[in-house]
Image (tube, rainbow, N blue to C red):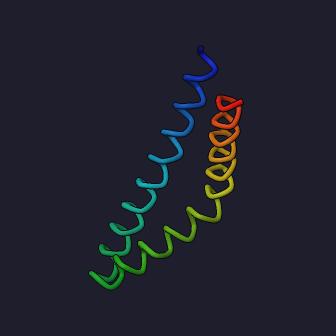
Amino acid sequence: MLSKLVVKLYSLLLETALWVMLVVGFAAGFKLHGLLGGILGLIIAAIFGAVFLGGLLVLNDIRKRVTELEKRC
């Protein structure tokens, strides 16, 4: 039971980290170069998040799908 809670919390933390990364990227870019900088910062933050957290999100998705398959059988 505790292990399932830890896995759910890990998924939530990954999702929260991605959203925070996007907001910080937009805010930093906006502060430096206005709206265009904010949009560019948002794009760079999205690419950075995909590269560094994308693999963890894929593993999490695989875990969810395997759990669904186990419930079916």
* Quarter placement of the N terminus: top right
Q: Left of 29 or right of it: where is 35?
A: left
Q: Left of 41 or right of it: where is 6?
A: right
Residue 51 pos. (x, y %): 64, 65
19 to 25, vertically: above or below: above
Residue 28 pos. (x, y %): 37, 69
Q: Tell me the residue at 59%/64% (across/down).
A: 50
Q: Tell me the residue at 37%/75% (across/down).
A: 29
Residue 72 pos. (x, y %): 66, 32
Q: Tell me the residue at 42%/75% (across/down).
A: 41
Front in this rendered view, residue 44 or 1:
1
Residue 30 pos. (x, y %): 31, 75
12 to 50, vertically: above or below: above
* Quarter placement of the C terminus: top right
61 to 53, vertically: above or below: above
Q: Quadrant of residue 53?
A: bottom right
Count numbered badges in the picture.
0
Q: Quadrant of residue 5?
A: top right
Q: Tell me the residue at 68%/40% (across/down).
A: 63
Residue furthest toward the top?
1
Residue furthest toward the left?
35
63 to 49, vertically: above or below: above
Front in this rendered view, residue 13 or 28:
13
Q: Quadrant of residue 40?
A: bottom left
